[in-house]
Image: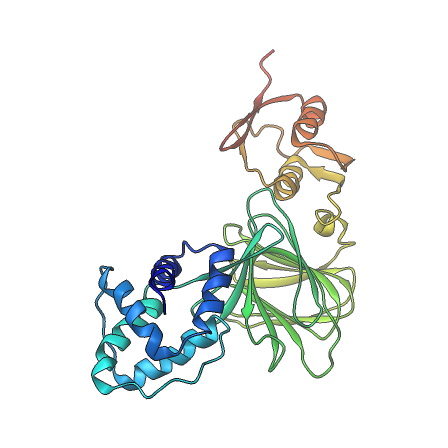
């Protein structure tokens, strides 16, 4: 190994363990590592270890297991290596521990979203504020995620089961597979299907969790006592109240629940409180209603491609309130004129 290669590898390893490595550097690292045996790489890793503030050691057995995990995590096939002398093991174990124990994460960049390979072998999709993301899961299931939502699933998704974890809001068009049910886990209720279309609203900072069925049939189960289970058909919605721990099913056309997908908002005699909730979900904004005297007044109308400023102007004319848009959200107060 040349001096320049040694220096580059050391630099990449340091960036890798501090989560500062770029996509291009990672690809080069993966290619270079695959060109060398473990015995050739350990001195480089040791230098990187000695330059860090960490100093952990593992047993030879644990080190062997972790070495395999590192190879697997960065999708590198192990290269044939000479037998490593025993006196190396303490240093080797410490180096490997560095990469496993320092919150090692691998960032892949896909269509302006970060998919993080977590230490527990989970893929995670995070959606930023005022953003929406569409993804396709390994089984072909299409998922649309609303702003500030998080979807995670095991990297071996589809091999044994089809299970995802959602915090936020997502619309699912599930690929049919009669042998493997599709399950959406949330903090308070689970949704189980074989193939269907539905919307799940499960933000951690909201008092309600909702599931609205568009097509097919599903089973919704609460994950806390009294462990209720409800079968649902199209145009029905299940609502879980976090305060009471109770779940109920109601009939609903589910137009409002899925309007955010087409970026359309439909209101039919909806109170301002509900209007603001839907507008907030679509545009990723929060509201601070200083004067609530008109919060129960109703509104009927449709918002399609309007900007948030246009929406607020229309609501201002209808309700007669005034508003102020700032970095923290939108304040609504009585018009004193």
Question: Which one is in front, 147 or 232?
Answer: 147
Position of 100 with respect to 35 (left or right) is left
Which residue is found at the position 22% from the left and 59% from the top? 53
View extreme (front): residue = 2
Residue drawn at 35 percent across, 58 percent down: 11
Question: Residue 51 appears at what percent x and percent y?
Answer: 24, 60
Asked whether, in this view, residue 10 is left or right of residue 176, the answer is left
Q: Image quarter for residue 171?
A: bottom right
Left or right, 202 with respect to 80, comes to right
With 319 as the anchor, is 76 left or right in this view?
Answer: left
Which residue extends farthest bottom? 83
Residue drawn at point x = 75 percent, y = 47 percent: 262
In the foreground, 273 or 301: 301
- Give the x, y percent position of residue 108: 53, 59
In front of the other: 83 or 318: 83
Residue 224 visible in the picture? no
């Amino acid at each position: 190994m040349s001096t320049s290669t040694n220096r580059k590898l050391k630099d990449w390893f340091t960036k890798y363990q501090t989560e500062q490595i770029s996509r291009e550097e990672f690809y080069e690292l993966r290619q270079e590592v695959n060109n060398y045996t473990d015995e050739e790489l350990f001195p480089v890793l040791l230098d990187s270890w000695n330059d860090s503030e960490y100093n952990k050691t593992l047993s030879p057995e644990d080190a062997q297991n972790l070495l395999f995990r590192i190879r697997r995590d960065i999708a590198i096939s192990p290269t044939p290596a000479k037998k490593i002398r025993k006196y190396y093991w303490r240093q080797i174990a410490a180096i490997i521990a560095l990469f496993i124990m320092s919150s090692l994460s691998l960032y892949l960049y896909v269509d302006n979203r970060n998919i993080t390979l977590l230490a527990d072998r989970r893929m995670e999709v995070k959606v930023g504020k005022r953003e929406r993301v569409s993804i396709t899961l390994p089984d072909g299931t299409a998922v649309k995620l609303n702003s500030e939502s998080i979807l995670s699933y095991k990297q071996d998704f589809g091999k044994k089961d089809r299970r995802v974890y959602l915090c936020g809001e997502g619309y699912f068009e599930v690929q049919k597979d009669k042998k493997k049910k599709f399950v959406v886990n949330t903090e308070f209720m689970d949704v189980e299907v074989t193939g269907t279309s539905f919307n799940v609203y499960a933000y951690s900072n909201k008092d309600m969790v909702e599931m609205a069925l568009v097509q097919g049939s599903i089973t919704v189960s609460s994950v806390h006592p009294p462990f209720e289970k409800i079968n649902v058909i199209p145009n029905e919605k299940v609502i879980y109240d976090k305060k009471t721990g109770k779940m109920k099913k109601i009939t609903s056309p589910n137009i409002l629940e899925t309007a955010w997908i087409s970026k359309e908002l439909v209101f039919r005699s909806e109170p301002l409180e509900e209007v603001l909730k839907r507008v907030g979900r679509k545009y990723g904004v929060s509201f601070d209603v200083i004067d609530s005297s008109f919060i129960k007044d109703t509104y009927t109308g449709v918002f399609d491609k309007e900007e948030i400023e246009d929406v607020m102007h229309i609501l201002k004319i209808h309700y007669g309130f005034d508003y102020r848009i700032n970095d923290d959200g939108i304040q609504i107060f009585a018009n004193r004129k």
